[in-house]
Amino acid sequence: MPEDPASPSTPSTIPSQTGTRRIPWSGLPQSVSTGIENVLGGTVTSAVSQGGGFSDGLAVRLQLADGRRAFAKAVDAATAPAVGAFHRREIAVAGRLPSGVPAPRLLGSFDDGDWVALVFEEIEGTLPVQPWREDELERVLDAVTDVADRLTPAPELGLSEAAPRLGGWGRLSQQPGGMAKLSASAPRAARDLEFHLTLESQLDEAIAGETLSHGDLYPFNILLTKDRAVLVDWPHAWTGPRHADLVMLLGSVALSGIDPEPFAARHPLLTGVEPEAVDVLISAQAGFLLAAACSAESTADQPLVDMMTGLGLASLDWLFTRRRAARRSV
């Protein structure tokens, strides 16, 4: 077993500001707004931009002249190719999720080779309150169990397998500039690099499984309605262990100043899972987030970088408390 990491710096909170590169409905080319209206078979009379996420492009609740409502998002893939690729993959994933999975129903899409748009049923819900409230967290934890049950075994998506948003310590260690940023933003993580590299060497084994995971399960990708928790934004779905989404979600709990461990200890998805395998996922989650933040160009959207840094530090905080408790129990 690797030596315990040092205690990380106290994490910040998830930035309340959404990404700064959102565009309004009025900012769409006419051909794209018309394409979305054609999907809906009606004329848009109202479009309200939505906060909570960090991707480039459009994210709006729409109302049509006939009273129907929908949600649409769109991006210019020529100027934001990575987001465009995510949108195109989400079209395929959302269209193949089994009925009963708490996710928005895809109504249709538009793709002219440059602009890509997705149109979903509107979910009348709100983002979970941050810092987390325990009653809302319990609702989401129940939903994660339900989703894992419904998506095991993973449905056939007809897509190449997505790389999970996990791991990054090895890549970061080869980037002098990135390591300098890590030393500044997370100095203890930089000092504990060998510890995280050791855990990362076990990642392939730790992510083996047959459950389709959401793959980006943070509070800004969850909507709470009166009677359910709905998971939105599925472009990063991948097949792995049943507990992968749970571990990712609990990392955000530490950012609220709440110890995730009591929730993890009693959650059915972690029953029988080796503690070391959970540690590998937590470290890999932090590695992905901090590597992305420390490798970001100077032109990167700062709220996104802040969010990744805060969540990465929160995961490290959880990992430290887990390892300390395990050592004391020996």
Image (cartoon, rainbow, N blue to C red):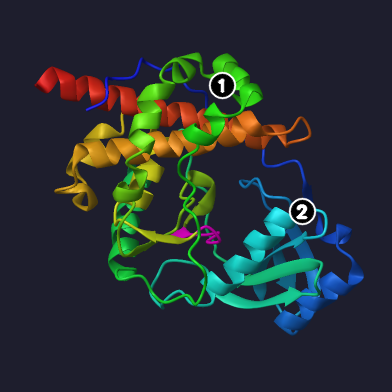
Front-most of residues 306 and 236: 236
Left/right of residue 204 with respect to residue 126 in the rendered view: left
Front-most of residues 269 and 219: 269
Left/right of residue 264 with respect to residue 171 in the rendered view: left
Mainly helix, strand or loop, the magenta region? loop
Q: Sequence order check: which comes first, mark 2 or mark 1?
A: 2
Which residue is label 2 attached to? 80
The N terminus lies in quadrant = top left
Residue placed at 78% from the left, 65% from the top? 46
Front-most of residues 9 and 136: 9
Residue 43 point in image, percent of width and height: 80, 78
Give the quarter of the image for residue 227: bottom left
> Magenta stretch?
230-236
Q: What element carries label 1?
A: helix
Left/right of residue 307 with respect to residue 320 in the rendered view: right
Give the quarter of the image for residue 35: bottom right
Which residue is label 1 attached to? 182
Residue placed at 66% from the left, 23% from the top? 177
Q: What residue type is labelled 1?
A: Leu
Above or below for 209 versus 6: below
The crowding category of the residue bearing disc 1, from other C-alpha atoms within 10 Å (few below 14, some 14 to 19, many at least 20), is many
Residue 188 point in image, percent of width and height: 45, 15
